[in-house]
Amino acid sequence: MSRIGKNAIIIPAKTEVKVEGDTVTVKGPLGELKRTFRTGMTITVADGKVVVAPKKAKIDVSTNALWGTIASHIKNMVGGVNKAYEKKLIVEGIGFKADVVGSELVFKLGFSHPIKVAIPKELKALSEKNVITVSGIDKELVGRYVAEIRALKKPEPYKGKGIRYSDEVIKRKEGKKTA
């Protein structure tokens, strides 16, 4: 039995959850999210709670994992339409810069050319003193976009130059010793 899946998801005030077949739609103060899940689970909304349960009486390992995953996705959807998810990145290094120009992030990361990354319309990005803040209602989209930005120039272990998460700790290595 899934520990996450068996817990009911409480729907906050001003939030509406609809289930049509395998599609779940969540509307809230910040927007609307829609997602289709695989069959095999029953998703019901009653008394201000969302309950996810397997259709079969006998639960195998994959159904148990799917149960918890679907419940977690719905919980993230409900949380996102009420309070936007936010991730911060720090651009560190001499000459490294990040700016928001229109609907693009423009990076100067020590390459011969600036790197331009389009900002998805569902997300908001701000850049202040080489700290990039990305926020949006879809947790998965925020995390994926921030990971793509970090992959442009991962932090190196000697000087810590590159793009890192604000809460990430870079283990520093000792450089060459002089005799």
Image: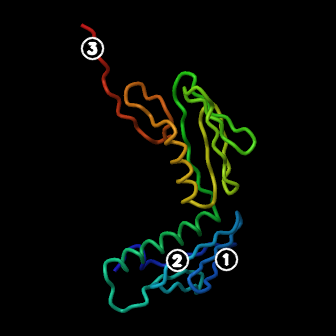
Mark 1 — residue?
Answer: 16
Q: Quadrant of residue 10?
A: bottom right
Spatial CA span between label 2 and label 3: 56 Å
In the image as oriented, which residue stretches furthest toward the bottom? 57
In front here: 118 or 41? 118
In this picture, residue 53 sits left or right of residue 128: left
Mark 2 — residue?
Answer: 37
Q: Is residue 80 above or below residue 5?
A: above
Mark 3 — residue?
Answer: 177
Q: Secondary structure at mark 1?
A: strand
Identify the amino acid type marked 2: Phe
| Residue at figure coordinates x 64%, y 69% from the top left | 33
Q: Secondary structure at mark 3?
A: loop
The label nearer to you, 1 versus 3, is 3
Spatial CA span between label 1 and label 3: 62 Å
Spatial CA span between label 1 and label 2: 18 Å
The label nearer to you, 1 versus 2, is 2
Cβ–Cβ below 8 Å for labels 2 and 3?
Answer: no
Q: Secondary structure at mark 2?
A: loop
| Residue at figure coordinates x 44%, y 77% from the top left | 7
Residue 36 on image: x %, y %: 57, 76
In the image as oriented, which residue stretches furthest toward the front? 112
Residue 12 on image: x %, y %: 62, 72
Q: Is residue 167 above or below residue 31?
A: above
> In terms of sequence position, does the residue under pointer 1 or pointer 2 come before the other?
1
